[in-house]
Amino acid sequence: MAPFTLSSFRDIAESEIIELYDSVGWKAYTDTPNVLFAAIKNSSFMASAWDDDGKLVGLARAISDDSTICYIQDILVRPDLQRTGIGRALFQKVKERYRHVRQTVLITDDEPRQHAFYRSMGLTEGSAFRPDPLRVFAEFK
């Protein structure tokens, strides 16, 4: 595992945020950087991961009412450091912060590696809930 440190509250330069989101190809975010910066600023909670040189290597952010629900909006790790435990540590940091809420929700792309990661974190896809599957309704613009 690559050495890294986690931080729940740390100022992050806008250039570091853009670089991280660009590294994973999330152009929908970086095409409108002011929207991305506002989203991060207005998140309920954020955890970040830093390498030994002080470079941002991962980030997770959540939106929550801090009572019943936590919506995990982003978990991203630089591609060269994926599968090193950073994503797992970021996810655990969010889960720890919101351990008291009843629902943790995450919407993701239809990518098998992402699905495997979230299943390994204990999340269940809505269609797999039994006896009755859950339905998710969303609108994306």
Image (cartoon, rainbow, N blue to C red):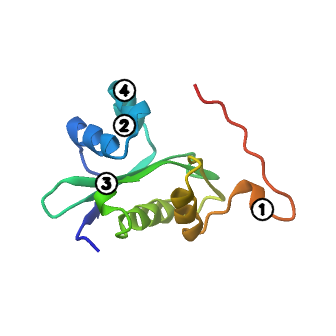
- The residue that label 4 is drawn on is 31
Residue drawn where x is 25% and y is 70% of the image: 2
The residue that disc 1 covers is 129
Q: At which x and y percent is residue 31?
A: 36, 26
Q: Amino acid at mark 4?
A: Asp
Distance CA(mark 4)–CA(mark 1): 36 Å
Q: Residues within 10 Å of mark 3 (few under 14, many from 20)?
A: some
Q: State the SS at label 2.
A: helix
Residue 68: assigned label = none
Which of the pair 54/81 is nearer the observer? 81
Q: Residue furthest right?
A: 131
Q: Is residue 8 visible?
A: no
**Label 3 to label 4: alpha-carbon separation:** 18 Å
How crowded pointer 4 is (Cα within 10 Å; few <14, some 14-19, many 20+) is rated as few
Give the CA separation, mark 1 to mark 2: 34 Å
Query: Can you identify the residue that label 2 sits on?
Result: 41
